[in-house]
Amino acid sequence: MNCPTKIKEIFVLLGMDAIAMVDLKNQYLSVKPEIDAVIQQCILGGAYINGKQVAIFERHLADYTGIKNVIGCGNGTDALKLAIMASDLPKGSKIIIPAFTYIAPIEMACFLGYDVVFCDVDEKDFNVTLEHIKAVFTEDVKAVIIVHLFGQPCKDTDAIYQFCKEKGVVLIEDNSQSLGAEKNIERDSITTTSFYPTKNLGAFGDAGAVLCNDDALANKIRKIASHGQSKKYIHDVVGINSRLDTIQAAILDVKLKHLDEYNLKRRKNATYYLDRLTAIENIVLPEISENHIFHLFTIKVKDGKRDALADFLKQHKIDTVVNYPMVAYQQKAYLQNIQLQNSEALCASSLSIPVYPEISESQLSYICDCIEEFCKTI
Ligand SMILES: *Cc1c(COP(=O)(O)O)cnc(C)c1O
């Protein structure tokens, strides 16, 4: 199965050591003069906290998404914390969250003292649907957090929003993985996002934002993010300190102009995989919906062969990631004695392969060759 000569030849050909899940250095090099210039401006400007670059980026992101208010903050997890805090849920409230997701929304709900009600997700597109939410809904539920996973907005978002509105329940949309997939968002929900370096719009460190159309809510979030202050040293509510750095805002403002182009490249890479891998029986490919921006390209490997494929690719110098290896209710910190069939099946079969914008066609081709070769042997 291992063919070292072939690997060596190919890597000489590609002029590289290995294929990682991202290539942040090359993304930087593609915009280096602009980034270097704005970083210099920030340093010379001296306003390292709340410099004018923060408000400028917030306005540009508001224009880009169509969501009226953007509040920059320290990271995507803080964004979720702020969204939940600003929702003022009564003590003992329950929050519905999908079990197949990144841990942050679950962690923040628990951290703030709420009970998490886990729901299942669709086995085909990894996302939560209205049916899954309805299946676990009770009168104690006061908020729902949906996650637009892997670059694809939940197809039921509008229906879920309507449902939440009818029930008087807060809807929080964790859009850390799908920024730019949907624009002109008019819903009165709270959106959160992360600019962790590997996200589709990535900073050079930690950064995040909360977005909402409601002005009063936006003011409240801004206040909570700044020690609950209405004015300097005047504290109206219990808050936290969560700020978007001036330098990160300046970098993000440069990269935001290229986000559509990055997302298009990701789609193009996904299309390449879909063309090349479609005939392979042991693999289920993701569907390419109209607005999928492929934060991750996640395949499902049949017959319990996922880990063997990951190992094979590793031997061939290709990085992969299992998103996600465990459902949240099986994690020690969040144990619940429940069973959600699709979520568990996805944890056992999903494997994400490199789809980042800077990957070359010869690299994509090599990855496909390796997957084909592995599948011939099983
Ligand atoms: C990345 C991510 C977060 C957390 O973002 P940080 O900036 O690392 O705190 C939250 N939710 C989802 C779905 C994510 O992918």
Image (cartoon, rainbow, N blue to C red):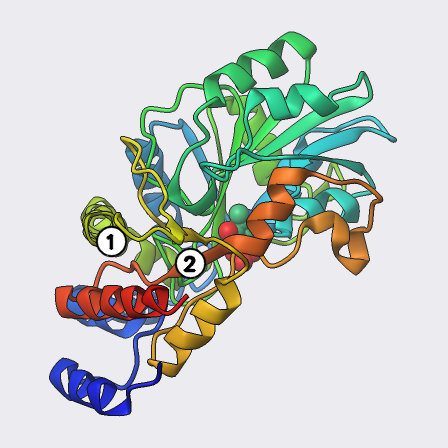
Q: Residue 32 carries which label?
A: none
Residue marked by disc 2: 352
Along the viewing direction, whichever of 107 and 231 lies nearer the viewer? 107
Indicate if the residue with disc 1 has its beta carbon within 8 Å of ligand 1.
no
User: Crowding at label 1, few (<14), some or many (≥20) Cα neighbours within 10 Å?
Assistant: many
Q: Quadrant of residue 178?
A: top left
Q: Quadrant of the C terminus?
A: bottom left
In the rendered view, would you say 276 is above or below 239?
below
Residue 265 image offset from top left, x and y in percent: 19, 51
At x 27% / y 30%, what residue is drawn?
290
Instruction: Identify the residue position indicated by label 1 in the image.
Output: 273
Q: Residue at position x 60%, y 36% from top? A: 221
Position of 235 relative to 156 (above/below)? below
Residue nearest the observer in this picture, 301 or 14:
301
* Image side of residue 116 versus residue 346, left or right: right
Q: Residue furthest right?
A: 92
Residue 61, percent from left and from top:
34, 40
Q: Which amino acid, mark 1?
A: Tyr
At a point 30% along the width and 40% down the height, the residue shown is 60
- The front one of 127 and 52 is 127
Query: Front-most of 301 and 292?
Result: 301
Q: Is mark 2 on a helix, strand or loop?
A: strand
Please tell me whether residue 80 is drawn above or below residue 157 in the rendered image: below
- Residue 200's x, y, as percent? 34, 52
- Tell me which corner region of the image, top left, top right, bottom left or bottom right, holds residue 237: top right
In the rendered view, tell whether residue 153 sits above or below residue 246.
above
From the top left corner, tell me how far across and down residue 355 is, in percent.
29, 58
